[in-house]
Amino acid sequence: MLNWVVTFLIIALIAGILGFGGIAGASIEIAKIIFFIALILLVVSAVVGFMRGRRTGV
């Protein structure tokens, strides 16, 4: 998912340099959304992994 964030940031930078403000703004917003989704999934994965590691079963 972080690859998508980098891709949209690069698109935003190129669009900003070329003067396409609308496309640059939209790309930045998409990159932010994907970044926060990836961050939430990372935290959930870490919590689930921590909980699984704590179980001591036979």
Image: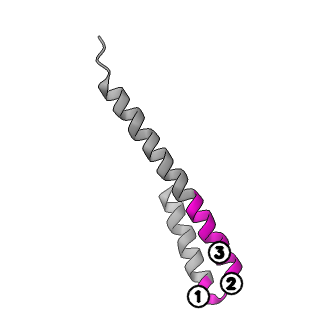
Residue tagged by mark 3? Answer: 25
How far apart, in angstroms, are the residues tagged by discs 1 and 2? 8 Å
Front-most of residues 1 and 21? 21
- The quarter of the rendered structure image containing the C terminus is top left
Mark 1: secondary structure: helix
- Provide the major secondary structure of the magenta segment: helix
Please give the label number shown on residue 17. Answer: 1
Can you tell which quarter of the image residue 57 is in?
top left
- Outermost top residue: 58
Residue name at image x 53 percent, y 63 percent:
5
Query: Residue 2 at what x, y percent from top left?
Result: 48, 59
Q: Which residues are magenta?
A: 16-33
Of helix, strand and loop, which one carries label 2? loop
Tell which tag, 3 or 1, sits nearer the viewer.
3
Q: Earlier in the sequence, mark 2 or mark 3?
A: 2
Q: Reply above or below: 15 against 38.
A: below
In the displayed structure image, the side of residue 35 where residue 25 appears, left or right: right
